[in-house]
């Protein structure tokens, strides 16, 4: 038997030292089952009592940070947050007033206040970070559970709100211990899994009508498979792809077991099998293409690719996205075909993903990635609206959202393409787009031709704005950038 | 050498066999396995063999010989030779004591 694969059970450091010669020894003759057991025990021993020191990992050199630029960026983030806060207060005050006047018996405004409040809390946690993301996590946990408990108390009945308090509390606790450096990520994973399993085993005992004990055991088993995969990646240097294969096999075995003991009938296990299987194939292609490019089979390189925008790597990442999309779309289409319903629901997830792929293409292909994303999103979104309209009755309603969005894209382009005069750029390009819209609308709708009247106003306002900018230059004796903030979303060289 | 230095845990016996094998000449893993099977009648498993090799190398009783071959040969170091000598002396002393007691018992092996 070929036992070379068992080398992946050994720690990374051990393999770095002995893998070559160990393989050579195994190649000398076939390996019996007893010897395979011996290798497995040897791997276990190598983990429990490591004899080879871990490889020295070179520290990634930190990118030089300009303190002034960092302060500017921080100030910009904080300004965005306070704008969000002001909007939050204003809108919710309006909702409160509307609620109080028209439906005082039903305080529905609390729901948008709560939902938006959680988003605002997350935003606050990201803008004013405490222990990286732990502050955001803590705030979100408190607000979410406060709302759920309030709903539970208001509605009455069983105290179901205790479960998110416990479950999410475990994640919060482990995250907190990790944030304060008490435990590692892997230990946090094990701890959270152990608590979750305990809860899974308690639920059938405490809650009437909950899923059976075997279902909970199956779910707990899946959680531990994730821990095993994490451990193999961490200590044995398994790639993400290899870990995912193990996870796939383990999950499918447990789900199959659940399906067999499930008395509801039908082989529902085929759906996760097909969808995940297609993703696994796509991941395999990406994994081995990466290996061919670099001689390394680590997905970490893909992450480097995402960070380095000055090379051809973004194009490769886009290529990978395309592969994954093709396989994902095929998986969803197969699911649709396997389904008994006679509707083509697969169009929606595939279409949505296709829009994301087009946006990704815009980010990669255009020199200014922000403009590329927006422009390509507009193109894809417009195509989607036209396609939806083609499949439904009614007039060409798509014209209006496409035109409105197009004007916004043009204004955005003005800001990004004229970084020294962003407002003027927005005014000019947005004005041109608005004028075009008016002309087009006139051509589409026919008389009366009142659409033309605003155009002179737009042109005059543009000229005035331009003149004002020139005048300011003359007064300050420098660039108008003193008056208009610089906004450069380009890559510098472009 | 004190006891701690030559403490090889459950790999003590395989380690001793490896030291004996290398006392003759440098050998790579598979050659050691064959040699040990020949002189001791014990076939070490690959996991056991490399568990012991890793320990012996860490304690500097053996060292890798520079080689272009994928099969990495090892040789005994001076410390390894001394450790082997001490182990064999201990075994000899135990064997001698045992033989003496067998002789003193006056019984003949059946």
Image (tube, coloured by chain):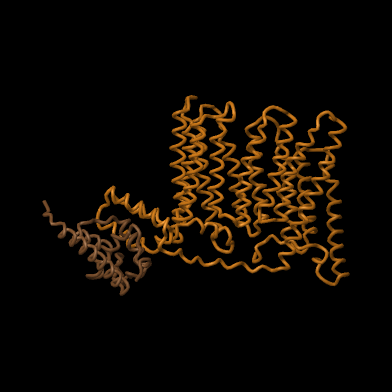
Residue A231 makes an appearance in the image: yes
**Residue A364 vertical position relative to residue B22 in the rendered view, above or below:** above
Q: Where is residue A30 in the image (x, y as percent from the top left)?
A: 25, 52
Q: Position of residue A251 (x, y in %)?
A: 47, 40
Q: Which residue lies furthest to the top in this view?
A: A264
Q: The chain coloured brown carries which letter?
A: B
**Residue A347 vertical position relative to residue A236 in the rendered view, above or below:** above
At 46% across and 37% down in the image, what residue appears?
A273
Q: How many numbered marks does the figure carry?
A: 0
Quadrant of residue A450 within the rendered picture: top right
Quadrant for the C terminus of chain A, please: bottom right
Residue A462 versus residue A334: which sits nearer the camera?
A334
Left or right: where A316 falls relative to B17:
right
Quadrant of residue B18 within the rendered picture: bottom left
At 57% across and 33% down in the image, what residue appears?
A203
At 57% across and 62% down in the image, what residue appears?
A308
At 51% across and 44% down in the image, what residue appears?
A326
Residue A337 makes an appearance in the image: no
Indicate the colour of chain A.
orange
Quadrant of residue B75 within the rendered picture: bottom left
Left or right: where A429 falls relative to A198:
right
Residue A186 versus residue A240: which sits nearer the camera?
A186
Residue A79 versus residue B83: which sits nearer the camera?
B83
Q: Where is residue A471 in the image (x, y as percent from the top left)?
A: 87, 66
**Residue A340 vertical position relative to residue B77 in the rendered view, above or below:** above
Q: Where is residue A338 in the image (x, y as percent from the top left)?
A: 48, 31
Left or right: where A423 falls relative to A196:
right
**Residue A323 vertical position relative to residue A209 in the rendered view, above or below:** below
């Amino acid at each position: 038997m070929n036992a070379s694969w068992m080398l992946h059970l050994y720690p990374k450091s051990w393999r770095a030292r002995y893998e070559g010669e160990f393989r050579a020894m195994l190649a000398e003759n076939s390996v019996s089952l007893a010897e395979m057991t011996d290798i497995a025990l040897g791997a276990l021993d190598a983990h429990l009592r490591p004899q080879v020191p871990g490889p020295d990992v070179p520290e990634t050199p930190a990118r030089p940070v300009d303190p002034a630029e960092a302060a500017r960026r921080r100030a910009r983030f904080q300004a965005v947050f306070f704008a969000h806060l002001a909007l939050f207060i204003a809108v919710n005050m309006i909702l409160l007033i509307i609620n109080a006047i028209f439906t005082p018996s039903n305080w529905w405004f609390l729901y948008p206040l709560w939902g938006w409040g959680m988003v605002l809390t997350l935003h606050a946690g990201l803008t004013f970070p405490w222990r990286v993301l732990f502050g955001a996590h803590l705030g979100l946990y408190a607000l979410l559970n406060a709302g759920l408990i309030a709903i539970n108390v208001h509605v009455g009945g069983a105290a179901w709100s205790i479960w998110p308090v416990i479950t999410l509390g475990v994640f919060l606790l482990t995250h907190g211990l990790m944030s304060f450096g008490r435990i590692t990520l892997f230990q946090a994973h094990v701890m959270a899994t152990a608590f979750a399993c305990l809860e899974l085993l308690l639920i059938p005992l405490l809650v009437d009508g909950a899923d059976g004990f075997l279902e909970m055991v199956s779910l707990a088993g899946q959680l531990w498979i994730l821990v095993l995969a994490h451990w193999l990646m961490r200590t044995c240097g398994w790639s993400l792809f290899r870990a995912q294969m193990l996870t796939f096999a383990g999950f499918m075995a447990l789900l199959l077991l659940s399906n067999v003991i499930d008395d509801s009938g039908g082989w529902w296990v085929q759906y996760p099998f097909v969808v995940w299987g297609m993703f696994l194939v796509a991941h395999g292609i990406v994994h081995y293409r990466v290996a061919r490019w670099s001689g390394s089979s680590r997905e970490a390189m893909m992450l480097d690719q995402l960070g380095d925008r000055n090379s051809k790597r973004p194009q490769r990442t886009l290529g990978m996205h395309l592969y994954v999309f093709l396989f994902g779309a095929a998986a969803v289409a197969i699911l649709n075909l396997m389904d008994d319903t006679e509707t083509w629901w697969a169009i929606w997830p595939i279409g949505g993903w296709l829009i994301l792929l087009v946006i990704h293409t815009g980010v990669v292909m255009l020199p200014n990635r922000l403009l590329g994303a927006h422009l390509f999103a507009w193109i894809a979104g417009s195509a989607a609206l036209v396609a939806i309209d083609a499949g439904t009755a009614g007039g060409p309603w798509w014209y209006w959202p496409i035109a409105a969005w197009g004007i916004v894209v043009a204004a955005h382009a003005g800001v990004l393409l004229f970084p020294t005069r962003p407002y003027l750029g927005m005014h000019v390009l947005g004005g041109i787009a608005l004028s075009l819209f008016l002309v087009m609308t006139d051509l589409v709708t026919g008389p009366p031709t009142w659409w033309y009247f605003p155009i002179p106003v737009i042109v005059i306002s543009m000229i005035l704005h331009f003149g004002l900018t020139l005048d300011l230059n003359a007064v300050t004796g420098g660039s108008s950038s003193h008056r208009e903030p610089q906004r450069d979303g380009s890559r510098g060289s472009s | 050498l004190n006891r701690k230095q030559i403490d090889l845990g459950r790999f003590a016996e395989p380690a001793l066999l490896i030291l004996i094998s290398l006392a003759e000449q440098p050998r790579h893993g598979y050659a050691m396995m064959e040699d040990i099977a020949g002189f001791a009648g014990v076939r070490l498993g690959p996991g056991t063999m490399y568990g012991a090799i890793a320990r012996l190398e860490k304690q500097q009783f053996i060292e890798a010989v520079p080689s272009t071959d994928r099969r990495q040969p090892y040789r005994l170091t001076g410390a390894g030779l001394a450790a082997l000598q001490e182990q064999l002396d201990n075994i000899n002393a135990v064997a001698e004591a045992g033989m003496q007691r067998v002789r003193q018992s006056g019984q003949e092996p059946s």
